[in-house]
Structure formats: structure tokens, C-alpha cells
Image (cartoon, rainbow, N blue to C red):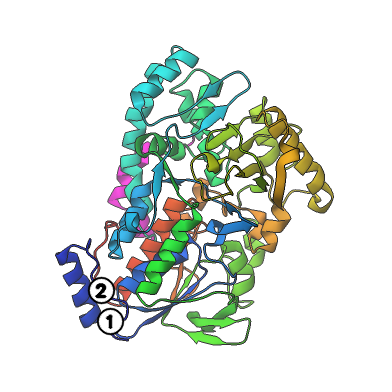
Amino acid sequence: MGLRGYYRPNNLQPALFVEYLFSFILNNKQKHIVVVGAGPGGLTAAMLLGARGFRVTLVEKDSTLGGRNAAIDLNGYKFDTGPTFLMMKFILDEVFEEAGRASDDYLDFVKLEPMYRLAFDQATVEPTTDHAAMREQIARVFPGNEEGFDRFLEKEQVRYDKMYPCLQKDYTSLSRYFSKEMIRALPHLGLGKSVMDILKGYFDEDELRLAFTFQSKYLGMSAWECPGAFAMLPFVEHAHGIYHTQGGLSEISEAMAKVCREYGVEIRLNSPVKELVLEGKAVKGVELESGEVIHADETVLNADFGYAMEHLVPKGVLKKYRPEKLRNMDFSCSTFMLYLGLDKGYDLPHHTIFFAKNYRQNIEDVFQYKKLSDEISFYVRNASVTDPNLAPEGHSAVYVLVPVPNLTAEVDWAAEKEAFREKVLQAMETKGEMTDLRDHIQEEMVLAPDDWEAKGIYQGATFNLSHKLTQMLYFRPRNRFEELDQCYLVGGGTHPGSGLPTIYESGRIAANMICRQHGVTFVSKNTQV
């Protein structure tokens, strides 16, 4: 294979380069890794493994990179398919650094201040990482709750410090679960409490609690059901901020692919996998739908977890995740999406969340009763106010997300889609004060739960498996897959879970495990694997 694409960039420290070089020379044994799926997890694993000297082939069923992090281009209006902001940016910075690169050399980051606007029926809040300004805002809008913000920062810092090492570990055995890190974290897990229960300990006002609990929907869960440990999510935002990448979050996938190619990774688009190739329980590569077989020493699976178990593993092989057991697992909610190319700009912040007047009823409809709500909550990204690259001059690319039940609900989307679209547009015109919105739509795309399923997303659950306690850490599908040998899982359906930073972490965990399996030394900020 040679040193194809292997050079020392200016920003790589000499010691790190020497370690990589010796690893390459001494340990490279022409090991071939196949990565299935060019989503964020697959790209992270491919980038790291390519940088460490493996021969890597990445196969992607679509014509574009990124999976749910891909770009949508509607005649000059550009949208992100799924994730629209980056939190825990330091994880992305680390995986680039571990690949011998600097993320800032490939991406143009913009830190958003305020982070977003939260529009309630009676109040508006604009959270910021400026803690003094945030405290003053709470004192003005929700007087008497400012000391709760101080306690929130203090206690959630401790929870985060204890929990973060647990999210970086692999859980290939029960002994890995009962580790010293987990023992230290146990008192901070908030066992038996939901995120909403935790926030009641900080704030008296319901709307203020919602301002620190809506992040549960990043996991596709209700704040009244999401485990209390995830109360650290809003803390992470307030501690580290959130970022936009100019050109959209899809540019992160494009940047990773560029690094992959620099290291000689072969990226094959329009190459859907038919199924894994097995010898007993060992995965020996993949068979493409074209009939071509790609042999590999290890296979990294970045397809949607439920879809992969149901379609990519030969029938009769699985036990723990066989189809009938898969159907009994808990999956996240789905989303109804509108991507609108407008010939006008609107005076909305980069991110705005509009809460239903009876928000709890709305959430119960989505998660408990699994029906469409009479009144919706919705999120609008108006990124053109920050990024001129997303629409023609004077125009805007507006992204709208509405949480809805996944396909376990008895909703006929073929019959409901147009009426629900009208409901969303009406809410935008009234709550969002975009009164002439319909007159300015030039391009439009709609994705409902059945459309997500058609894209290979099990039950249309856009946030993958839910994050209840029995589907976290050791109890979540593991990065070294427990049912098959020579197979690793990355993405939102495995540990540590859904969301861009944790998906990047899943790719790093898998890459580190493969390196250790084959005696390849590496430098990583994740020292838990």
C-alpha cells in the first residue's frame, strides 16, 4: 500500500507524527476495513483508520455523503437533512487532531450567541453562554429563579464530569460496565428521576424548566421520561456553546471525506449493501446489491441500526436482535420536516423553538398516545441570517422540524401529510409572524415518517433507539457488536447514542478498538477504550 496520502501537515506535532509513522511501518499488515455507510460515525471511523495506515473502503448507498447529516440542494437553496447545530465541538476537534489534521483548516465555524430563541406563550428566552447575562435574563423574565441557575451550573458540572468518561468507554463485557468510572458516576445518574424531575430542583417556573429540558428531544424523548442523567445536556450547551459551520453542518461530512481521501480511503457512492458476508458468526465483508463481494478483515456498520438488523444480516443468524425482538425495543419519535426555499428573508434568529401553549399535552400526544396533536411545537432554523451560502442573495433557506410519533402510531401519512403541512405553515404564519410565507415559497421538500422509513430508517425513528436506562451504556447495542465477530457498530443506534458529538465518539471508539485488535498504536484523547 505504501505511504499513500500519508504526509505530515504543518499543524501535526513531531512526536505525534513519529508515533503515527512507526505505527504505520511496524504494524501495517495490509488489513482491510470496510465501512458501511458514510454518515458521521462511518466517516469518523474511516478517517481515523485511514490515518493510522489501514486500507479502508467506505461504501454508501446514496449518491451523497453524510447520511442524516447530508446536504439537500433544491435549485440553489441548501439545507441540512437532519442535525442543524454542533455542540461539544471539542470532540470534533479531537478526532480531526487524531487524524493529523485541524478542523479549522477544513471548516469555517461560527459560535452562535445567543444560542437560540425559545418562544413560549407568555415569555421569550434567548439562552446564552454568557453566564452573567443569562442570570440577568432569568432575573428579569423569571424573577427569583436566578440562584437556581447558579445551582444548575454547579451541580450539572459535577454530573457531566462524572458521566463523560462513561460515555467514552466501550462496553464489550459486564466488567467494563462495573468500572471505577461507573461507580463514581452512580450517585450522579439521577436514578428514578426524569430530566424534568431534576430541573424542578433548580427552577420554580414551568417555562423556565422547559428552557432547560427541551434538549431531551435531541434524543427523541420526552423530558418527563428521559433519564435524569441527561440533565447535563443543557449544561453542555451553556458551558461550551453551540456552533454553525458555514455552508451547513453537512460540510463536516464533506471535510471528513476530504481527509479520508487524503489518506487513500476509497469512497464508493451509489453502492448499496445487500447483506453482510458471514463465515459462521464472523463477518468477512459485504455483498453489494450489484452482486460484488468486498472482503474485509473487519467491518464497521454505520447503517441505521434497526434497518441493518432487519435487512443486512442474513436471516436466522441473530438472536438478541432478531426481528421480533427488535420490534419490542423502544425507538425515538419521528419528525415531520419542511425545507422551504423562500424569495424573501425573515427577521427570525438562526434557531427558534416555538412551544405549544399546552406543551405537556403536545409531548404526551407524540410519545404516549402516539397521535397527531391539535397544537404543535416546532423548530425553525433560519440559518440564512448567519450564512449567505445557503440561498441566493435576498432569499433564505428555512428548515422546519415538528416532532411526531414514529410509525408504530396508527397515522396514515399518505392521507394526513398535506393537512399536516397546512397546519405547520399556519403555525409559522401566526406564531412565527411570517404572515406572507406561502406567497414566497419557491422551492419545497417535505419529509414525513414514512419518507424517513423509505430512506432506510427503522420505524421512521429519526433519533434511532430511545435512551431509556435499559438501552444505554452496556445495555445499548455495543460498538464491538455482541452478536457477530469482526463487526463494529457506529452511529446513533449504538453506544454512546444519538446526536453528532456522541456519534463522532462512536466512530472513535470503534476505530480505537480495531487498532488495538491489530496491534496498531495510536494517540487518542479518548483514553477509556
Quadrant assignment for the C terminus: bottom left
Left or right: residue 135 compared with residue 407: left
Q: Which residue is mark 1?
A: 3
Left or right: residue 62 compared with residue 469: right
Magenta region = 173-193
x, y percent for residue 158:
31, 35
Q: Which residue is mark 2?
A: 7
Frontmost residue, 86 versus 284: 86
Q: Amino acid at mark 2?
A: Tyr
Look at the image and say whether residue 500 sits in the magenta stretch.
no
Q: Amino acid at mark 1?
A: Leu
- Residue depicted at 73% across the width and 56% down the height: 450
- Kindly report the secondary structure that dominates the magenta region of the rendered protein: helix
x, y percent for residue 266:
44, 78
Quadrant assignment for the N terminus: bottom left
x, y percent for residue 348:
57, 32
Q: Is residue 234 above or below residue 506?
A: above
Q: Are marks 1 and 2 in contact (CB under 8 Å)?
A: yes
Left or right: residue 329 compared with residue 503: right
Frontmost residue, 450 versus 62: 62
Task: Give the quadrant of residue 382.
Answer: top right
Element at badge 1?
A: loop
- Residue 495 visible from this viewpoint: no
> Residue pushed farthest right?
415
- Residue 30 visible from this viewpoint: yes
Task: Give the quadrant of residue 122.
Answer: top right
- Residue depicted at 33% across the width and 35% down the height: 157
Q: Is residue 356 above or below residue 277?
A: above
